[in-house]
Image (cartoon, grey):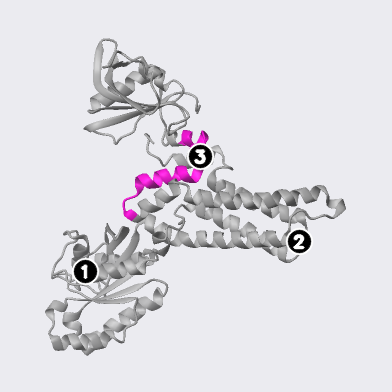
Amino acid sequence: MTHKDTIIALATAAGSGAIAVIRLSGDDAITVVDTHFKSVVNHKLLVNQDTHTIHLGHIVDGEKVIDEVLVSVFKNPNSYTGENVIEISCHGSNYIQQEIIQLFLRKGCRMANAGEFTLRAFLNGKLDLSQAEAVADLIASDNEASHQIAMQQMRGGFSSEIAKLREELLNFASLIELELDFAEEDVEFADRSQFKELIERIHFVLKRLIDSFAVGNVIKNGIPVAIVGEPNVGKSTLLNALLNEDRAIVSEIAGTTRDTIEDEISIGGIGFRFIDTAGIRETADVVESIGIKKTFEKIEQAQVVIYLFDVSVTSNAVEKSHTVKVEIEKIKNKYPQKPLLVVANKIDQISESELKKLNVMLSAVEASHIALMSAKTGFGVEQLTNALLNLMNTGALRNNETIVTNSRHYDALLKALEEISKVKHGLDTGLSGDLLAIDIRQALYHFGEITGEITNDDLLGNIFANFCIGK
């Protein structure tokens, strides 16, 4: 693949619409469009116009007028890709889009590959690699939290933090390397106490960034929440109440849900993926048994578990109350790291005296949160969603701290931390400069992997293949 030719692609979503945008980038982008653009103002040429200007006219193929368009001109290096860029805003007919694209393909342009505009921006120094990856995350963001993280990274918050650490480490590395040139004279150019302070600080920052991945990853992908309990306690009704739509079938017949049902909503700007599971009980039904098996698989995958039980039978039966407590303890013991929310459902069906008995029973239950609810009427739903928000560690997000969401970055940070730990140990044990230098070089290498100072064609191919064509 050459990055010197002129590429073209549809920059807006495929299909018919009011407006479509066709983007071209390359040295000849402006001149090639000039040959088929007739301005409504004195037939002016685009090559003579200032950068960041918009011009009304027609795209023509000989005597044939294809469409009336607005053409935006961006001249290098002040464009998204760092090259000459043209964006043609035409009417959103599929026919018009293809006519314009095919016209310029015949004139020597090439269809852009996935993410090639952003790849060129990276190669031309307009973005570093982590910023380029944040562009894809921004496009894919579907809630406030994931959008905020992507914007922070695209503005360079993460990469600037890494670049600063890398620069400081590189300065000390240069001094260590210099010492090796004067090994026979036994001199130290790098102040070991200052160097140790730097390594301690880098170690702390890397640990913080690595720990943030646990939060960042679930925010980016949606936090999975499993709704579990016995059959007919209102799990599907609760899912419908949370989504505010009839997503799951609700029936008086126990065991209606045979498979898991999933849907996602945004609560307080954070995406939650709710999973309605099959009721847990002993059964001879083969299909229902498969559904119950899937329930436990989904609990394994979930970040949060909601255990739902029916108070309309529980409050009147001591034996049933004991069963609920046993089931809660089973979940807690099997998944001790998962936050557990216990929800007492159908409280609209019990009396005041029964409610008092229920409160006594719940006072003996240990859980991350306990809520009283009527999923059918909607009572208590807001209390539950607030409890879910409170469970999530979003303090870093609110404080605009750097949060890692990219698994490639996470892997590079882990490797960098491993090398920094070796340097730290070497300083503590008085390791020689030549051996310290080896570990420092490896740490610098992994820092460079994140921002793109260290890269290769296979890595770039994997990253940009996940982009849409017009970006």
In this rendering, does residue 457 appear at all? yes
> Residue 32: horizontal and vertical position, in percent?
39, 18
Q: Nearer the viewer, mark 2 or mark 3?
A: 2
Say which residue label 3 marks.
Answer: 460
- Which range of residues does the magenta coloring cover? 119-144
Q: Earlier in the sequence, mark 3 or mark 1?
A: 1
Q: Where 464 falls versus 398 (above or below)? A: above
Q: Are marks 2 and 3 in contact (CB under 8 Å)?
A: no
Residue 421: in magenta span: no
Which element type, helix, strand or loop, lies under badge 1? Answer: helix
Q: Nearer the viewer, mark 3 or mark 1?
A: 1
Instruction: Count residues near mark 2 (Cα–Cα under 10 Å), then give few for <14, some for 14-19, many for 20+.
Output: few
Which quarter of the rendering shows the C terminus? top left
Q: In which quadrant of the rendered view does residue 271 lie? A: bottom left
- x 87%, y 51%: residue: 184
Which element type, helix, strand or loop, lies under badge 2? Answer: loop
Which element type, helix, strand or loop, lies under badge 3? Answer: helix
Q: Where 119 falls versus 370 (above or below)? A: above
Q: In the drawing, what numbered circle is on residue 381?
A: 1
Q: CA gap, disc 3 to disc 1?
A: 45 Å
Q: Are marks 1 and 2 in contact (CB under 8 Å)?
A: no
Q: Where 158 falls versus 243 (above or below)? A: above
Residue type, numbered disc 3: Leu
Q: Is residue 345 left or right of residue 391?
A: left
Characterize the magenta stretch by its predominant secondary structure. helix
Say which residue label 2 marks.
Answer: 431
Residue type, numbered disc 1: Val
